[in-house]
Amino acid sequence: MARSYLFIPANVPRMLQNADVFEADALIFDLEDAVSSHEKDEARALLARFLDEHRPEGVELYVRVNSDDDLEKDLRTIAPYDVNIVLPKARSAAIGNLTTLFKRLKRRFRVLALIETPKAFFELDVIAEDKMVDGLILGAVDLLNETGGTFSEDGDALLFPRNKLHYAARAADIRSIDTPWPRVKEGLEHDIKRTAALGFDGKCAIHPNQVPSINEAMSPSPDALYKALRIIKKYESEQTTRFSLDGEMVDKPVIEKARKLLDKAKRYGMEVGEDG
Amino acid sequence: MARSVVSGSLESSDCLITLTEAGETSVQVDTIVHEAFQRHLESLIRETLKQSGVKNIKVHCQDQGALDYTIKARLEAALARYEENDDG
């Protein structure tokens, strides 16, 4: 599972061909907002040739497709390649319509649903439960344009959408992915800590410089991993779901949390050592 | 007036392809990289043109250090635009 999802404009060769050096866990090649309407055709041609000849390895690949008349052209272009899609302005009806399109193209894509309209928040459970959907992404800039909220460091305007989206994703057992922070560095650390504290699985990045901070903040800390390892070892040796460790009571939810943390670390390729 | 289309840009690692209707096919490459690479680009463009079947066209490629995939993609996009603009 990915921690960082880096947007790469699909019509910029220097970004495409360097995409795999930015150390993001997932790349989202953007055919939508990063490409002006008169450049869509050349962006599709460039992305197809790039995937033919320079497909990055060892990283999850997505394409943010357009949600309008260009959607089918986008899907046709990327159909031959091992990529999945980010669907902007996702609504339950739009996701339902994908089924017909996928049949016509004889190609099924997995979908990350970009939630960026107020109405989508009132059908999140339906979107999250769709069998094609692997995750929900919060798109805060467009959302706040509609709600009138402000994208600020205190994050107040995003508290409800962030929590609602994360809970819907968790209930459906799919990924929750937070919105990118709109500035390259200023305020980024604070924003990422909030993302991690809310329990999100990953976060989007709009600049390669944001990736290392996201990866670090979204990974379990060595101290937390060491403690989780000790909890699991003691649980396995004592065969009870209620015991004390370092003066703290450990019960079933704590054991489960420790197990999830260790699983998460394994997914990120982190080493879990005895020495912390 | 001769039909003319462009694709790409003059940004680093990109190229700007200009196609113009002409009496015969010709390829002009201006590149910021070594002269030896100019011949490679010309050959790449002629091969892509051959595959497209488009003839009687002047290709002007202003290369800013583009890799092969970019040259081919920009030329393919330009050729598609050229075909779309065919009023005959």
Image: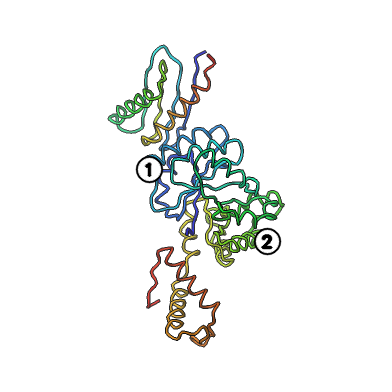
Host chain of mark 1: A
Along the line of sight, which residue is nearer the eye, A185 or A1?
A: A1
Q: What residue type is labelled 1?
A: His
Q: Give x and y (percent) for residue A216.
A: 47, 63
Question: Label 2 to label 1, Cα distance in Å?
Answer: 40 Å
> What residue did someone put label 1 on?
A54
* On screen, residue A15 above or below A151: above
Return the mark for residue A160: 2
Is A48 situated above or below B16? below
Location of the C terminus of chain A by quadrant is bottom left
Considering the numbered disc 1 on the image, is that residue within a helix, a strand or a loop? Answer: helix
Q: Mark 2 lies on which chain?
A: A
N-terminal label among 2 and 1: 1
Residue visible at 40% across and 26% down in the picture: B61
The total of numbered circles placed on residues is 2
Residue A125 pos. (x, y %):
65, 58
In the image, B11 versus A211, the foreground residue is A211
Check whether the beta carbons of the residues at disc 2 and disc 1 lie within 8 A of each other.
no
Q: Is residue A15 above or below residue B16?
A: below
Q: Residue reaching furthest top?
A: B23
Q: Which colour scheme is used?
A: rainbow
Which residue type does callout 2 highlight?
Phe
Residue A213, labelled with which disc?
Answer: none
Category of crowding for the residue at label 1, using alpha-carbon neighbours closer than 10 angstroms: few (below 14), some (14–19), many (at least 20): some
Residue A95 in the figure: left or right of residue A80: right
Q: Position of residue A54 (x, y in %)?
A: 38, 43
Q: Mark 2 vs mark 1: same chain?
A: yes
Secondary structure under tag 2 reads helix
In the image, A97 versus A276, the foreground residue is: A97
Of B32 and A29, the residue lying toward us: A29
